Image (spheres, helix red, strand yellow):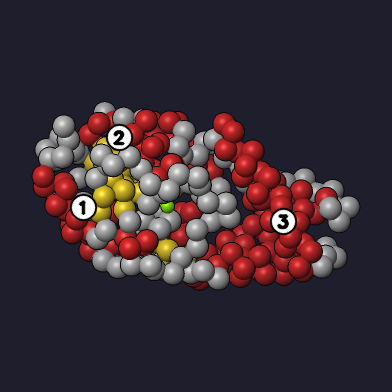
Amino acid sequence: MKHIRAVAFDLFNTLITVEPQTLEDANTRLFASLSCSDFSLEAELFAQAHHRAAVRHIKESRKDWRETHNSLWISAALEEYNYFVPPDDSRIALAVDAYFSAFMDHCRLIPDTLEMLTSLQSSYHLGLLSNFTHGPAARKLLSRVGLDVFFGVVIISGEVGYRKPHRFPFMKLVDRLGLPSHQVVYVGDDPEPDIFGAKQAGLQPVWSTYVRDLQLPHTAGILSSGQKVPQPDVPTISKWDDLFSLLRKDFVK
Ligand SMILES: [Mg+2]
C-alpha cells in the first residue's frame, strides 16, 4: 500500500473487547449510584426502563446518525418513576460515570495490539475513531489500556455529534490527520459503521474478523447494527500479521 500514510482504527472489538458481563455490571453500578442520590427505584424494573429508553434513543439516532447520550436514557427512565430530572443534572452525571466504571474494569486489549501499534507508528500516522456516546469515558478507557499514547488523532462520536457510518466523523478524522481520505486505511469489525462508513467517506476499509474468528468473549453493544458482512472486495484480516501483509502489498487499485 504505497500511497497509504495513516492507519486508523475502530475501538470496540477491533482493539479492545469488554467482557460479556459488562453491561449487566454497568447497570448494577448505575442503579447503585442513583440509589445513593436518593432516588427510590426498584432494580429490575428500573433496568428494564433504562434499557427501553436506551433502545428508543439509539434507534432514533440511527435515523440521521446524530449521537445520543446516556444521560438522556437515564432521564427518560427516571421519568417513569415520576422523577423529572434534566439530563444535565449532576446526579445523572455521577450515574453515567458509575455506569462506565464497569467498562474500565472489564476491558481487555486484543492480543499483540500494543506491539502492532508500536511497529506501525514508525511508518504511519495513527488515528482512532470510535462510536462512543460519552467522550470522557472513551478517553479514560484509552488511557486505562495504554492506547492513548499511540494516536495523534482521536475522534469520539459523542464529542463530534455524529456516529459512524455518517461521513462527518470520518471527515473529522482525515481533516485532523491532514491527509486526503484515500491515503487513510480504516480498520474495524462492524460492517455497517466501519466498512460501509469508511468506504463512503473515501477511506480504505479493512474488515477485522479477529474477535469473531477467535470467538473472544465480548459485548456486542445494546443494539447491534444490521449489516453482518461487507462487500466481498473489502480486504479482511483475522490477525495483526494480516494487516502488515496488506500494508506491504499495495492493495489500492
Ligand atoms: Mg467495533
Q: Amino acid at mark 2?
A: Leu
In the picture, measured across the screen, residue 214 lies left or right of residue 92, that is left
Residue pictured at 57% horizontal, 38% vertical: 62
- Judged from this view, the residue extending furthest toward the right is 82
- Name which residue lies at 72% across and 56% down: 50
- In primary-sequence order, the first of circles 3 and 1 is 3
Q: Is residue 30 above or below residue 68?
A: below
Q: Is residue 229 left or right of residue 105?
A: left
- Residue 243: which disc? 1
Taking the image as shown, residue 156 lies to the left or right of residue 6, namely right
Q: Residue at x 33, y 63 (%)?
A: 213
Taking the image as shown, residue 246 lies to the left or right of residue 174, namely left
Residue 226 in view, yes or no: yes
Whether residue 22 is situated above or below residue 8 in the rendered picture: below
Where residue 82 sits in the image (x, y, percent)? 88, 52
- Residue 50 image label: 3
Total numbered labels:
3
Residue under label 2, please give it: 203
User: In what element is the residue under mark 3?
Assistant: helix
Q: CA distance from mark 3 to mark 1?
A: 39 Å
Q: CA distance from mark 3 to mark 2?
A: 36 Å
> Which quadrant of the rendered structure holds the N terminus?
top left
Horizontal and vertical percent position of residue 128: 36, 47
**Residue 242 falls in image quadrant:** bottom left
* Residue type (three-letter) at the residue carrying disc 1: Leu
- Let me know if residue 10 appears in the view: no
Check disc 3 and give the amino acid type: His
Q: CA distance from mark 2 to mark 1?
A: 16 Å
Position of residue 165 measured from the top left corner of the image (x, y, whole percent):
45, 37
